Image (cartoon, rainbow, N blue to C red):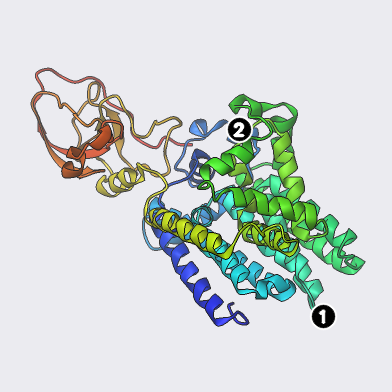
């Protein structure tokens, strides 16, 4: 895959692969709740784990594609051939899958840019491109997320290379394959269809793609869209048109606006605030220069319609524009290099540029290390440990703070065959063990209860270092085993058995 790259670029690429692999391993949990509830819990329903009545409202509206839940189902059932699948192992595998696709997209884009863009032969621009493609902290973080935004962005970038850079006698086959990948990107996240449409228009009007090659590209796209339609039929058990259901409910009926409305400039200000200012300004300036100066560039035609549509839609979240992150190195380098050609960067002397780069690295390297080794979700370690500690027949008790009802009910990562209930209202007679969970730092146990601490999200010595009161503001989940309990009075009714039939 790295053949044809300069030696220093090959070294950077493989180090980048290692960074992605480490991040995929340690970045447990999800970035947004949709990753869990609309992928893992959807898959849990198909596997007979999650009751349909406790799925999010999108399930009943039949507006989410089945592609990612189907991947989870496939991985889960494959692991089941070896024994009881661990949901956290399933999550690791799909994160690694996303990392492989992200890495493939980054390498293909790099090779394509090296082949057609003379700017990439200049050392400083190549180094900047390599850094943005393989070591930028939020690019690494998003590159391992098995979310619709992460998966669709990686798939689109792979398909983009085949359309924008395809050359030679086999280009019809390449274009068909690129169409298949682009179609899968649309199936994963419908909004990416705007990027695909812009790329298609560029291919016809600017690149002047011959009709037979255009037909090969379109055929590949429709093959994937058709496969997604059939996959939705398998998943939901009926013929549904999820793309239309999504557009009708969220756009035409305005359901999405009920989750919040933001001004049109939201993405600009939020990106600058969250992507490490003042360096984040270049993530805006570079693409904007390219859009204005490089009006015939395939990136401009693909990205501008996508961005304009998201500016016009009232409900905005920063994650909605994550699909363009794999293209960011080409956007930034493309725009800034054009600014250099027009001498717009004369004010940036070599000494100032070196100081700026050094300061950025001093700030960025620790941030990247945190991203590589820190879980994406703070409480995921607790859920993983509880899954491994609890066994069928065990009773998990809580002090009116059910860990499996934090917002929507959690089923896919819940230990199988256990009961869950409040310690105040649950019959404690069980053949299995009694486990108690709490995120209260000063948990008080009922009189007569003897416990043994099995797990704490933070060790006691660290909690005692409560500088600035951080521990008081942090949910510290703990797991105890109840060794004995002699209450003063009987406890109430039984809790129903876990995992009712969907």
Residue 255 rendering spot, x and y as whole percentages: 66, 27
> Looking at the image, which residue is at 59% across and 62% down?
349
Pointers 2 and 1 in contact (C-beta within 8 Å): no
Whether residue 482 is situated above or below residue 230 in the rendered picture: above
Q: Please tell me in which quadrant of the rendered image residue 405 appears.
A: top left
The one nearer the camera, 8 or 255, is 8
| Disc 1 element | loop
- Location of mark 1 (residue): 169
Between the residue at mark 2 and the residue at mark 1, the CA separation in whole angstroms equals 48 Å
- The answer to whether residue 230 is seen in the rendering is no
**Lateral position of residue 48 relative to residue 338, left or right:** left
Whether residue 124 is situated above or below residue 473 in the rendered picture: below
Whether residue 312 is situated above or below residue 448 in the rendered picture: below
- Location of mark 2 (residue): 60
Residue 67 rendering spot, x and y as whole percentages: 61, 51
Residue 76 rendering spot, x and y as whole percentages: 46, 55
């Amino acid at each position: 895959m790295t053949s044809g790259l300069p030696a220093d670029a090959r070294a950077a690429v493989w180090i980048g692969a290692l960074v992605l692999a480490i991040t995929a391993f340690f970045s447990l949990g999800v970035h947004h709740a949709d990753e869990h509830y609309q992928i893992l819990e959807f898959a849990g329903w198909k596997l007979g784990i999650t009751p349909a009545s406790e799925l999010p409202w999108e399930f009943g509206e039949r507006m989410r594609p089945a592609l990612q839940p189907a991947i989870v189902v496939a991985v889960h059932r494959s692991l089941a051939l070896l024994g009881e699948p661990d949901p956290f192992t399933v999550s690791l595998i799909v994160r690694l899958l996303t990392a492989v696709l992200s890495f493939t997209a980054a390498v293909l884009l790099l090779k394509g840019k090296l082949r057609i863009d003379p700017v990439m032969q200049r050392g400083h621009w190549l180094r900047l491109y390599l850094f943005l493609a393989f070591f930028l902290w939020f690019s690494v973080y998003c590159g391992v997320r098995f979310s619709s935004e992460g998966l669709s962005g990686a798939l689109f970038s792979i398909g983009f290379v085949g359309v924008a850079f395809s050359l030679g006698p086999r280009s019809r086959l390449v274009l068909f394959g690129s169409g298949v990948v682009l179609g899968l990107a649309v199936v994963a996240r419908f909004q990416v269809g705007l990027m695909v449409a812009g790329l298609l228009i560029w291919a016809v009007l600017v690149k002047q793609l011959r009709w037979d090659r255009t037909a090969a590209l379109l055929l590949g796209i429709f093959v994937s869209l058709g496969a997604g339609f059939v996959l939705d039929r398998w998943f939901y058990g009926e013929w549904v048109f999820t793309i239309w259901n999504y557009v009708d409910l969220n756009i035409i009926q305005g359901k999405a606006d009920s989750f919040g409305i933001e001004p049109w400039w939201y993405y600009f200000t939020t990106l600058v605030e969250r992507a490490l200012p003042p360096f984040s300004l270049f993530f805006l300036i570079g693409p904007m220069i390219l859009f204005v100066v490089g009006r015939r560039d395939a990136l401009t035609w693909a990205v501008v319609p996508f961005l304009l549509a998201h500016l016009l839609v009232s409900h905005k979240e920063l994650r909605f524009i994550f699909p363009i992150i794999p293209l960011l190195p080409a956007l930034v380098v493309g725009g800034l290099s054009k600014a250099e050609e027009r001498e717009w960067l004369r004010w940036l002397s070599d000494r100032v540029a070196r100081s700026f780069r050094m300061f950025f690295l001093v700030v960025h390297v620790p941030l990247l290390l945190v991203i590589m080794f820190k879980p994406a979700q703070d409480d995921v370690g607790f859920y993983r440990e509880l899954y491994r500690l609890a066994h069928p027949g065990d009773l998990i008790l809580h002090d009116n703070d059910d860990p499996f009802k934090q917002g929507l009910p959690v089923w896919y990562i819940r230990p199988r065959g256990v009961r869950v209930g409040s310690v105040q209202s649950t019959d404690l007679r069980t053949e299995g063990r009694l486990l108690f969970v709490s995120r209260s730092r000063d948990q008080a146990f009922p009189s007569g209860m003897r416990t043994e601490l099995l797990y704490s999200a933070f060790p006691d010595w660290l909690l005692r270092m409560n500088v600035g009161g951080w521990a008081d503001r942090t949910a510290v989940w703990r797991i105890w085993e109840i060794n004995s309990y002699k209450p003063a009075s009987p406890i109430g009714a039984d809790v129903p058995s876990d995992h009712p039939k969907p």
